[in-house]
Amino acid sequence: MAKIKQNSPVLFFYNNSKKWLTKISKNESFHTHIGILKHSDAIGKEYGSKLITNKDKYVYLLEPTMYDYVMRIQHGTQIVYPKDIGYIIARAGIGDGQKILEIGTGSGSLTSFVASVVKPRGHVYTFDVDENFMKIAEKNIKKAGVSKYVTQHNMDLKTAKKMPLENMDVALIDLGDPWVVIPQVRQMLKGSGSVFAICPTMNQLEKLTMALVENEFTDIESTEHIIRNIEAREGKTRHSFQGIGHTTYLCFARKAFFGRSRASTKKSKPAEAKKSTSKPVKKSTKTIKTKKSTSKPVKKSTPKTSKKSLEK
């Protein structure tokens, strides 16, 4: 049985709209509209127990999941929601031991979730150019307890001359112009490696798809994921009036080899034939030497003939 201790993370759960994520500290109290919760009262209790406030309201002490961390992280930018993250992980087949490239750390929601899946043998390498967002992400990643499995880089891959990584299993892109980094992503992905890009608009989706085709990616798929909550109650179950609608479009693809270089080679066969005739450019060097050697006698033979002509 997992029991709550000093510094244990706890989700104080009152209802679906009123829940608070905190770390237990025996000298602290949590003040809410439903009353005061003393942290010390939670210490020693099993996860799932309940606490009574001074207003006779009760909350459950739940062990936080990665979903809870993601939904309650500090937002520096728009986050990637669990409904989209779940599909990304499933579709790309992300699992323990994989190396993940992320371009656009943002608030670190996707970073944290993916790191929790690839640990303990895998790692997430995340890149961003905004130091302020990176600091927010660092706090969120630390709060989620996955700092050990994440390396943050303050680097603009759009302008990088040399790619810092290779043989990545999956690339995740969360930029306003994801198509710009597709050539760089291709260099860092292994063969058949997956790429997922987050696109808030369809215009971005179109440009991205064109770039994926140009850079030899296949299995291209664009999707949108919407969750509709149901309020299930005896005799009056109905759809919820609240819910998360459109958040983003997702674009998935895999690195392939179209054989374009081979096709261009076939087309250029005549040119190669020319090269092959000129390939004896190396041989022709020898020929040139022989010519030089023959040309030397030419110089000698000229005086000989001239002597003969003089004798005549």
Image (tube, helix red, strand yellow):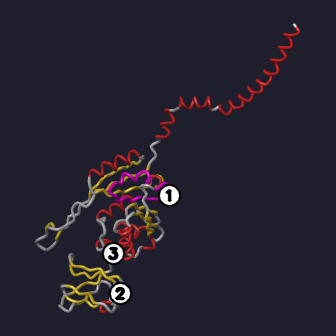
Residue 233 among those drawn in magenta: no
Q: Nearer the viewer, residue 232 or 105?
A: 105
Mark 1 residue element: loop
Name the disc covering residue 4, or none. 2
Mark nearer the viewer, 2 or 1: 1
Q: Position of 170 compared to 34: left or right?
A: right
In contact (CB < 8 Å): disc 3 and disc 1: no
Can see residue 169?
yes
**For numbered disc 3, what is the local secondary structure?**
loop
Residue sitting nearer the eye, 234 or 253: 253
* Residue under numbered circle 3: 65
Q: Over which residues does the magenta segment extend?
A: 160-185
Question: Does residue 173 belong to the magenta stretch?
Answer: yes
Instruction: State the residue lying farthest toward the right.
Output: 311
Kindly identify the residue that appears in the image at 38 percent across and 45 percent down: 213
Location of mark 1 (residue): 166
